[in-house]
Image: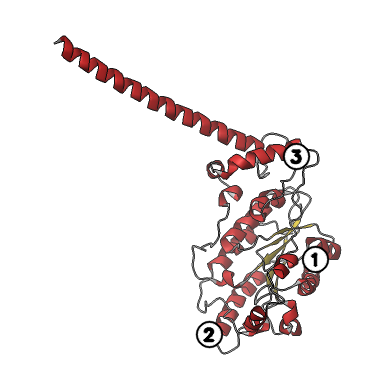
Amino acid sequence: MSSSTSSSEVALTGRTKWTGFVATLLATAVLFAAAFITAGFLLDPYDSGRSPLALKQGVRQQGPRTALASRGRDPRFTSAIIGNSHVQFISPERLREKTGLSFVSLAPPWTLPRETLLTIDWFLRHHREVPAQAVVIGIDDYWCTPDPTLPNEKPFPFWLLSRSMPEYLGGLMRYDLIEEISRRIAYLASGSAERARPDGYWDAEAEYLSQGYMDRPELRRKLEEPEESGGGNIDGPFPAAARLEALMTSAPAQTKFILLRPPVYASSLPRPGTAAGAAEAACLKAYADLASRRPRTALLNWRIDRPELHDSNLFFDHTHYRVPIARLIEADIAAAVRALE
C-alpha cells in the first residue's frame, strides 16, 4: 500500500513540475513578446509617428516600401507623386521648381492599386492640418482590372500604413524587426547616421544601364515586338476607380488631383478596332469620368501616339521610359496643376 502511494505521489509531482515548466515558458514568451512590441512601438523603427517619444525625424537608408510611412507623413511635403516604377522618374525637385509646391515621391517598384490606394490614404490623413495641395497618381494598366480584390504581387507592409493600431502592433511581431531595432537605435543615437532621402526620389537609370537594357541586342529587339496592353477589361467594372473616387471625395476640396496615364513604347500602344483598343478606351473613360466628377481634378493621358514614344533610345522596356520623357511629363503635370487654380 505504501509502495502504491509512493508511486502515485512521484507521478503527481512529475506532472506538477512539467506543468510548472510549461507555464513558466509560456509566461516568459508572453513577457518577451510584450517587451519586443513595446520596444518596437516606442522606437518606431519606420518613423510612422505612432510613438509617444520625441524621436529624430526620418529613417536610415532602406527600401522604399518601409520608408513610405516616414516620407508620406513628412509635413514639409504638401504634394505627392504616388504610384510605382511607371512614375518613378518624375522628379519631386523639378516639380517644385515648376509649380512652387513641395513634392515627395511615394513610388516603390511593383506596387499595384491596392498598395497605392493605401499610400494615398496615408498621405491624405497625415496632411489634414495643412491640407495636401496636389497629388499625382500613376494610373497604369493594373488600374483597369475588374477584380474587386485588387490582388498584389509582391510583399507590401500593409500593416505599417494601416488605420488599425492592433494591425500595426501585430505587424511589429516580425523576425526582421529584431535587426531593425538595433539599426534604429544606431540611427537615433548617431549624429552622422545617413538618412534615407526625404523626398523619396530614386534615379534608377544607372541600375537599368548596369543590367544592359540599352546595349543588349536581344532586349532592343524585344522592345520592337508588340506587347499586349490596355488592361483587358472591356465591359467593367473598374473597382480601383471606384475606390480611388471614394478617397478623392474625402480629400479637402482644395487638393488637386492629377491622374496620369503613363506612356508606353509605341509597339505597346493599343490599336483602335482591336480588343486591346476597346479595353484601353473603356479604362480611359472610367478615369476620365472620375476626373470630370470632382472639381480640381485632371486626367493627363500620355498613352497616345506621339513622336517620343517611337524613339527606342528613350525606353528601357515597353513600359519604363527614361529621364527625357519624364521631363516632358513633368512639364505637363505642372501645366495641369496651374490650370486647376
Q: Secondary structure at mark 1?
A: loop
Q: Nearer the viewer, residue 246 or 63?
A: 63
Residue name at image x 52 percent, y 34 percent: 33
Placement of the C terminus among the 4 image quadrants: bottom right
Q: Secondary structure at mark 3?
A: loop
User: Is residue 251 positioned above or below 300 on the image?
Assistant: above
Q: Could you tell me residue 65's position as x and y percent?
A: 64, 54
**The quarter of the displayed image where residue 280 is located:** bottom right
> Distance from label 3 to label 1 (Cα)?
36 Å
Q: Is mark 3 in CB contact (under 8 Å) with mark 2?
A: no
Q: Residues within 10 Å of mark 2 (few under 14, many from 20)?
A: some
Q: Could you tell me residue 50's position as x and y percent?
A: 65, 40
Residue tagged 3 = 56
Of discs 3 and 1, which sits in the foreground?
Answer: 3
Q: Residues within 10 Å of mark 3 (few under 14, many from 20)?
A: few
Picture colour scheme: secondary structure
Q: Amino acid at mark 2?
A: Ala
Q: Is mark 3 in CB contact (under 8 Å) with mark 1?
A: no
Q: Amino acid at mark 1?
A: Glu
- In primary-sequence order, the first of circles 3 and 2 is 3
**The quarter of the displayed image where residue 37 is located:** top right
Position of residue 320 in the picture relative to residue 141 (left or right): right
Residue name at image x 62 percent, y 73 percent: 289
Position of residue 34 in the picture relative to residue 97 (left or right): left
Q: Nearer the viewer, residue 149 or 177?
A: 177
Residue tagged 1 = 341
Q: Residues within 10 Å of mark 1 (few under 14, many from 20)?
A: few
Residue tagged 2 = 275
Q: Could you tell me residue 43's position as x and y percent?
A: 66, 37
> Distance from label 3 to label 2 (Cα)?
53 Å
